[in-house]
Every structure is written in C-alpha cells, then in structure tokens.
Image (cartoon, rainbow, N blue to C red):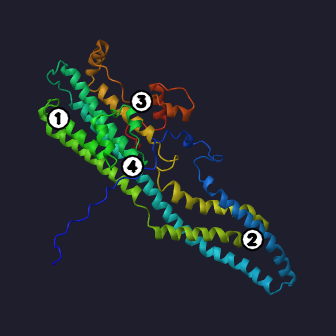
C-alpha cells in the first residue's frame, strides 16, 4: 500500500505555566531597611546565611593547614626535612603562586557575571515600573476624557452609570497588573484577588481565568480595551473630537503593558547559559578551596581569620549573583510587589475619584444620597490581615499608608509591581 502523504499531526499536549506558590507573598518588612542606617550587624536579607558554612569550612581547613605548616617551616630553617616534608612544603608555596594567578581570573569572571546579573535584575525592576506607569497613564485618560454621561438606562441615572464605568476600567487595570506580577512570583491565587475586590467570585471573568493555562494578564488587557471601546462608542462617554486619539492611547498602553509583562516572563524563564555559570562555580569553588593553603605560607596563624573573609568576598558575590539577584521574585527578600501594587491602585483610584475637579462635590452628593455607593478597590490592601501579621501592628488608616509609601519612595510614578 502507498504511504500516506498527508498524515494527521499528533495532538499537542496542553502547555501550562508552572506555579510554585499557592498563596500571594506578603509584605517583605523583614528585609526592608532605611537608607543610611548601618547594616553591619544585619543577617536577614544578607548573603551571610548563604556563605557562613563555606567560611567556617575554610577557617577550619586553615587551622589544620597552619598546624601542618608550622613544623615544616621550622624544619626548613634547620634543613631537617625529609623528601615527603619537602614535597608538602613546596605544595604550600606553589598554592600561594597559583592563588595569585587565580585571583585575577576569578575577579574578572565574577565581576563580569555579577554585572550582567545586576543589570538583568535592574531591568526587571524597570519593566515592573513600565507596567505600572502604563496603568497610571491609562487611568489619567479615564479620569480626563471619560466624562460624558450616557442616557439613563434601566432606571439607572447617567451619572451613576458613568461613575461605575470609570471604576470598572480602573478595576480591570489593577487586575491586569496584579496577574502580571503574580505570574512573576509563579503564583496562581485568585482568592487573593477576590478578597481585594479585583475579581468577583464565580463571575464569568473568574471562570475564564481559572481555565486558562496562561497567567491571564493578556486576556484582562484585552477585556479592558473591549470595555473601553464600548463605553466610548455605544455609551458615548468620550467626546467625538478626541475619540480616536483616546482609543489609540488606551490601546497603546495596554499593548505596552503586555509587552513589558512578556519581557519579564522571558527574563525569568531564560536562564544565563549553563556553561558560563558552571565555569564560574568551578573556578570560584576551586579558588575558595586553595585559599587556606595559599595564605598560610605568608600569614601563618593570621591566615585563620583572613581566609573566611576572602571566602565571604568571593563566594559571597558568587552566591549573590546565582541566587538572590537571579530571580528577584522567587525569594521573600525580593521586590515588595504587594506595596507596589497597593500604591498603584491608590494612585489610579485617586485619579478616577478626583478628576475632573468639578466632580468631587457631585460625587460626594451622590454618595450622601445613597445613589452611588462603591467599595474602594484599595480597601482590601489597607486592611490586610496577612500584612498585619508580618508588621505586628494594628490596621493602618489611609493617611498612614500613604505616608509610608511616600517615605519609601513608592508613590507617584516611581512605582513598580506584584504577583498572581
């Protein structure tokens, strides 16, 4: 029989993102510090817990090396060394020369590696900032241009419809940011989003997000564009004179948010080449292991405290680059994305509530009359029971939270964001 020319391709398996957490990381108060304060006696959040065992090992090895080398040194002066003792003495002296060669090479490759890793870490911070900034810019467009009241519908006043529509767009912006930042943490915690008012339990959005293999931020950004277009077109909430420019700006902001989110995923899913990392680890550990033998001929007993310091420097920078800076979302010492997201939502919600200025009094009247009552999106962040456990303080009021964000430089445009 003739072979089949057109065979049916195998059905691909459904790819899904791997999530390593089931709950949203809390505030990283344990790892924060005030600029200018001394960190000399600090352990949490530093590299010392990752390198102390290696420093202790080199300290012990150096002690025994001194014990072995001291009689060799005395015997060399008296010229009373046998063949084995001479070989051992030459080994100590040769290690001293080998260390001189290794120092330049290890310093170069370690410095180059850490430079790459830190630039990668800083770029991820900038990408988070770009996502937040795109949301802030979009919220400004909502506040300034979504101001025309639609006709009353189903007994709901046009002013109330407009307020609810503006708030719905802000919610979708916050939801997209939260999902993007959760994806960075490898978190899939829809309950966390529901508790903060960013998602409604068992809603159509919730059902769709639960069944997605992807993090879901791209879908949310598309939902935003679709709803914004409906509010602008069918409901006529935006003046026709600026319709095209506002729609273009909204689409561009959502595309930018999607692009920056995908760049973050690329950084997190694409490691530094294993050959480079392997060579760095090999050379660094060899250098640390020959350090005790190399320092003893020159420093003798003084080498015992010096060897751990050399290990702390070289092995510490190695561990810093390969663990702490490689993925700033994996460890609890990484970016405080919950505070970033909270500050972003506070800013976006403030824009929607206070722009245009003429709306403030009218909104207050609607709320006093009970016509328009909506829970603040930021309320779920300001009274966060999990955060209170970390901070060991009573629930904070809004001015206190804003003051904390201002003092830590996290309000306004200098913000960057959280996890899903």
Q: Secondary structure at mark 1?
A: helix
Query: Residue 362 in the image: x percent, y percent?
Result: 26, 17
Q: Earlier in the sequence, mark 2 or mark 1?
A: 1
Query: Residue 30 in the image: x percent, y percent?
Result: 57, 41
Residue that mark 1 sits on: 230
Q: Can residue 253 be seen here?
A: no
* Within-10-Å neighbours for mark 2: few <14, some 14–19, many 20+: many
Please say if the residues under marks 1 and 3 sit with CB atoms less than 8 Å apart: no
| Distance Cα–Cα, label 4 vs label 3 | 26 Å
The image quadrant where one finds the N terminus is bottom left
Q: Residue at x 66, y 69 (%)?
A: 289
| Distance Cα–Cα, label 4 vs label 1 | 32 Å
Q: Quadrant of residue 246?
A: top left
Q: Earlier in the sequence, mark 4 or mark 2?
A: 4
Q: Earlier in the sequence, mark 2 or mark 3?
A: 2
Q: Secondary structure at mark 4?
A: helix
Residue that mark 3 sits on: 380
| Distance Cα–Cα, label 2 vs label 3 | 60 Å
Numbered tag placed on residue 296 in the rendering: 2
| Distance Cα–Cα, label 2 vs label 1 | 77 Å
The image quadrant where one finds the C terminus is top left
Residue 277 drawn above or below residue 268: below
Q: Quadrant of residue 72?
A: bottom right
Residue that mark 4 sits on: 126
Q: Can residue 152 be seen here?
A: yes
Q: Secondary structure at mark 3?
A: helix
Q: Secondary structure at mark 2?
A: helix
Residue 376 drawn above or below residue 121: above
Q: Is residue 151 left or right of residue 213?
A: left
| Distance Cα–Cα, label 1 vs label 3 | 28 Å
Q: Residue at x 35, y 41 (%)?
A: 177
């Amino acid at each position: 029989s003739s072979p089949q020319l057109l065979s049916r391709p195998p059905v691909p398996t459904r790819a899904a993102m791997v999530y390593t957490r089931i709950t949203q990381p809390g505030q990283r108060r344990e790892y924060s510090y005030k600029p200018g304060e001394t960190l000399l006696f600090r352990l949490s959040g530093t590299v010392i817990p990752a390198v102390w065992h290696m420093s202790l090992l080199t300290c012990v090895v150096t002690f025994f090396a001194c014990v072995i080398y001291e009689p060799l040194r005395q015997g060399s002066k008296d010229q009373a060394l046998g063949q084995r003792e001479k070989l051992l003495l030459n080994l100590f002296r040769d290690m001293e020369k080998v260390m001189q060669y290794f120092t330049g090479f290890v310093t170069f490759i370690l410095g180059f590696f850490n430079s790459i890793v830190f630039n990668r870490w800083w770029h991820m911070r900038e990408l988070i900032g770009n996502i937040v900034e795109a949301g802030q810019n979009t919220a400004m467009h909502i506040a300034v241009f979504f101001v025309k009241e639609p006709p009353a519908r189903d007994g709901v006043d046009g002013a109330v419809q407009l307020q609810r529509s503006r708030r719905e767009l802000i919610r979708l912006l916050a939801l997209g940011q939260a999902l993007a930042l959760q994806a960075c943490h490898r978190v899939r915690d829809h309950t966390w989003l529901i508790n903060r008012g960013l998602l409604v339990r068992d809603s159509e959005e919730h059902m769709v997000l639960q069944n997605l293999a992807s993090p879901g931020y791209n879908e949310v950004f598309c939902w935003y564009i679709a709803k914004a277009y409906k509010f602008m077109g069918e409901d006529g909430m935006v003046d026709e004179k600026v319709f095209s420019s506002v729609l273009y700006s909204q689409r561009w902001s959502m595309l930018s948010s999607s692009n920056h989110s995908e760049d973050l995923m690329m950084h997190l899913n694409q490691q530094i080449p294993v050959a480079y990392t392997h060579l760095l680890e090999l050379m660094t550990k060899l250098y640390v292991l020959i350090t005790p033998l190399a320092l003893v001929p020159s420093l003798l007993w003084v080498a015992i405290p010096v060897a751990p310091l050399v290990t702390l420097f070289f092995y510490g920078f190695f561990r810093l680059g390969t663990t702490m800076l490689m993925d700033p979302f994996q460890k609890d010492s990484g970016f405080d994305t919950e505070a970033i997201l909270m500050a972003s939502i506070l800013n976006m919600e403030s824009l929607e509530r206070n722009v245009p200025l003429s709306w403030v009094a009218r909104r207050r009247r609607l709320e006093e009359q009970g016509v328009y009552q909506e829970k603040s999106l930021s309320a779920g962040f300001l009274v966060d029971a999990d955060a209170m456990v970390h901070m060991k303080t009573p629930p904070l009021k809004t001015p206190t939270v804003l003051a904390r964000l201002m003092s830590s430089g996290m309000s306004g445009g200098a913000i960057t964001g959280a996890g899903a």
